[in-house]
Image: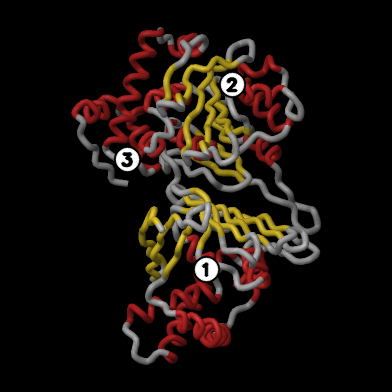
Amino acid sequence: MEVLDKYTVEREGLVIDITVKKTPSLFVPLYEVKIPEISEGTRILIENKLKPELLSKVELDMRELLDPKEAPRVKEKFKRAAYQVVKDNFKNLDDKTVQLLVSYLVINTIGLGELEILSYDDQLEEITINSSKEPIWVYHKKWGWAKTNLKPKDEETIYNYASLIARRVGKQINILNPLLDATLPDGSRVNATLAPISSFGNTLTIRKFSKNPWSVTRLIENGTTSPELMALIWTYVHYELSLIVSGGTGSGKTSFLNAISQFIPPNQRVISIEDTRELTLPKYLQWVPLMTRQPNPEGKGEITMLDLLVNSLRMRPDRILVGEIRRKREAEILFEAMRTGHSVYATLHADNALQTIKRLTTPPIDLPKEMMDAVGGIVVQLRQRRLKIRRSFEFAEVLESGEPNVIYRWDSKRDRIKQVNPFKKTIEMINLYTGKNEEELGEELKEKASILKWMTKHQYYEVDEVGYLIAQYYSNKDELMEYVERDERWEIDI
């Protein structure tokens, strides 16, 4: 058995040991979770004695349980009661062990138990239960899909998880409503299905909201993209040219959209529209995030992407970010917004630049090809499953004819992004807006690439750090360039 990775996660008083192993009997890694201080006997005692005792001690009404805003107060109330329950049952424990048992007892009483422990690991993107007959699966940022050493006790346990989540967000899941699609207060997306809709048993899928959103520098540092390509995209954003980020499922479209939004100047108003809150923009921006809403059980109260898109145009936006283009009417309004002077950045499912144009100009979206030149450029993200990497696969400018001209492409043999064609339209567009010629644009691209390399070298990885330095470029460029030329770190007080 080969150990691939080993690290510790600390949260809520729990110290959790994580080991990722490669085993001969499995075709995927084993993700092993261990809380060393809690023995199996203690776990059984917590489940069978302490948990019922805690529930009998805490008095709560339904309003407190169902209101997400009350969650911190409810948790604190349970913590105080749990402390007393643990002290009554374990007389001679030190304070550290008492706090450990209190945390474990609380998450197994009003939390999601083992699922909550898994959610503490920021390296996980997805947590899934397929049935009680197999272990819980996770998607690890580094190692991909892995089986855990945790397994639901029975189908009722999975249903209880789903039901608890549904109550937290004011929804319900039962035999009459066997499907649940919900967003937790922390931004994580949850989907649940009940048998017999899912043939093998009840299922639960949690797509975690990233607490450390991708920044431009993180993408450069891990090889997803290059400073030269990001300098070009920065220039597009700088001069208000619209972009579409396309790619397959799990290719990192939204993460890339989040990263390039950090190039937006701080003196502009940004409206984002999403089904699920995934974007996190720098705090220096004037940002209004909008989210769709599903209908209630009576079929009323739905707010669609189209509703929000139409409404956003009345909010005087300088930039509009759209989670994903799916339908014709959404695309029509989006392209009309581009033609009326709004800068739009959106994602779309497509495997390359040409497929992006085809997807937009054939049913079901079916826009006229003549409209395509409203888009300045197309960035294509790729997920290489065999190598478990994500890369910027293509960058193309969109010509007057609506055809893409691929300028940058990923070389899979050498694992690098290189320029494959000269510009045909970009220089002309930027010259129109700024008066800069090809030589001046080339110098600007080199300058921006040098800033991005400097930021990456000095490990400015947080979204707000990157946002601060980009804002300095727009308002205090000379001083920023002095730091870059001296290769000196700028101490940021955020």
Q: Which mark is residue 460?
A: 3
Q: Nearer the viewer, mark 1 or mark 2?
A: 1
Question: Residue 305 lies in what quarter of the image?
Answer: top right
Residue beneath the point at 67% across and 72% down: 156
Q: Measured along the vertical axis of the image, is residue 74 above or below residue 140?
A: below
For marks 1 and 2, the one nearer the N-term is 1
Q: Measured along the vertical axis of the image, is residue 213 above or below residue 74?
A: above
Quick check: can you spot residue 467?
A: no
- Amino acid on which the number 1 mark rests in the picture: Glu
- Amino acid on which the number 3 mark rests in the picture: Tyr
Residue tagged 2 = 375
CA gap, disc 1 and disc 2: 46 Å
Question: Mark 3: which secondary structure?
Answer: loop
CA gap, disc 3 and disc 1: 34 Å
- Amino acid on which the number 2 mark rests in the picture: Val
For marks 3 and 2, the one nearer the N-term is 2
Q: Nearer the viewer, mark 3 or mark 1?
A: 1
Labelled pair 3, 1 in contact (Cβ < 8 Å): no
How far across and how far down the image is residue 281, in percent?
Answer: 46, 41
